[in-house]
Amino acid sequence: MNKKVLLVEAWPIILCNGKRKAQVARHLSNMDYCATKICIIYVVELHVVAQHRLESLPFLQSK
């Protein structure tokens, strides 16, 4: 039986803090609150979907 296993992960990428406005990827960034740093930040989310392949090297596939 051949089952496909997909892994999904998301990471926030901090562009700048709340004292500044995002200059890069302004249309993609969101203003968010960072509880650990106690500040407002502009972030972009990086989403990754990976497929587990037995006995083979991984490769990057973009759409």
Image (cartoon, rainbow, N blue to C red):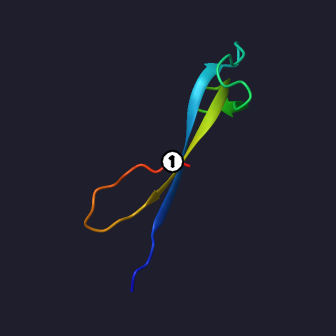
Give the quarter of the figure containing the N terminus. Answer: bottom left
**Residue 8 placement (x, y as % from top left):** 52, 56
**Residue 47 placement (x, y as % from top left):** 56, 46
- Residue drawn at the location 69% of the way across and 19% of the way down: 22
Residue in the foreground of this view, choosing between 7 and 1: 1
- Determine the image quadrant of residue 41: top right
**Is the residue 14 above or below the residue 22 in the image?**
below
Relative horizontal placement of residue 38, taking residue 9 as reference (left or right) = right
**Is the residue 11 above or below the residue 29 in the image?**
below
Relative horizontal placement of residue 40, taking residue 51 as reference (left or right) = right
Relative horizontal placement of residue 6, taking residue 29 as reference (left or right) = left
Q: Secondary structure at mark 1?
A: loop
- Determine the image quadrant of residue 30: top right
- The amino acid type of the residue labelled 1 equals Ser
Relative horizontal placement of residue 20, taking residue 1 as reference (left or right) = right
* Residue at far bottom of view: 1
Please rate how many residues cluster around mark 1, counting C-alpha atoms within 10 Å: few if below 14, some from 14 to 19, many from 20. Answer: few
**Is the residue 40 above or below the residue 12 in the image?**
above
* Residue at far left of view: 55
- Residue drawn at the location 62% of the way across and 19% of the way down: 16
Residue in the foreground of this view, choosing between 22 and 51: 51
- Determine the image quadrant of residue 51: bottom left
Residue in the foreground of this view, choosing between 11 and 4: 4
